[in-house]
Image (cartoon, rainbow, N blue to C red):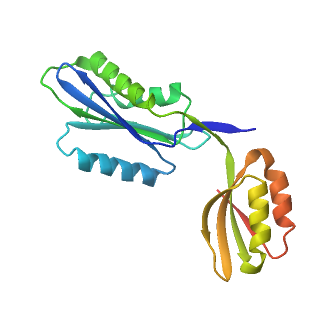
Amino acid sequence: MEVYFTIDKTAVAEFKDRGSKFLAYVFPVKTPEAVKDCLMEVKKEHPKATHHCYAYRLGTDGNQFRANDDGEPSGSAGKPILGQIDSKQLTDVLIVVVRYFGGTLLGVPGLINAYKLSASMVLQLVPAVQKNIESKYHLTFDYTIMNDVMMVVKQNNCTVLSQELQLFCTMDIGVPRSNEELCLLRLRDIHGLEIKQVK
């Protein structure tokens, strides 16, 4: 079975070093839009903070990631945060570390350590959860075959991502890759159902 590890809760941790205060926030995220929303939320809550450094990894192929130093010396904040996400082999995770400067310079090694520790501390507060890797499909069907569609969706452990149920229905589902072929065969057996894979 193809699986990945992520989190399903938010948390916050605090770390202090020589007068500087670091607040680390962790969020489960699925899209770059969700990342932006969470960042805005943290910036609104801490408008006077000197830095809002962050890192995220999205998707099960591991290709979508970013590490941002937000004005700290290059590589001293975002990379250490991303390193903590990767060390736990997590994806669909955003960590934002807010720094309030306390007057004493920490130097680059001190900053790397502070951001790394802050990220590590917040990740210890949220348990990793295992999820199936899924392919996404868009279904279009008449309301009269709703029960048939839902039965296949439930029997194959699919995730309903969104749905609009009226006389004419649309539904986006996540199909576990481990039984994708069988699930699609069963769905295609339902007369009047249109299926399209979503990239």
The quadrant holding residue 133 is top right
Position of residue 168 relative to residue 148, above or below, is: below
Q: Is residue 116 left or right of residue 178?
A: left
Q: Residue furthest left?
A: 103
Q: Is residue 78 left or right of residue 159?
A: left
At which x and y percent is residue 94?
43, 40
Viewer can see residue 80: no
Q: Residue at x 85, y 53 (%)?
A: 182
Q: Is residue 4 left or right of residue 20?
A: right
Q: Residue furthest bottom?
A: 167
Position of residue 134 relative to residue 165, above or below, is: above
At which x and y percent is residue 51?
24, 36
At which x and y percent is residue 174?
67, 55
At which x and y percent is residue 86?
51, 29
Q: Quadrant of the C terminus?
A: bottom right
The quadrant holding residue 73 is top left
Q: Residue at x 24, y 47 (%)?
A: 45
Q: Quadrant of the N terminus?
A: top right
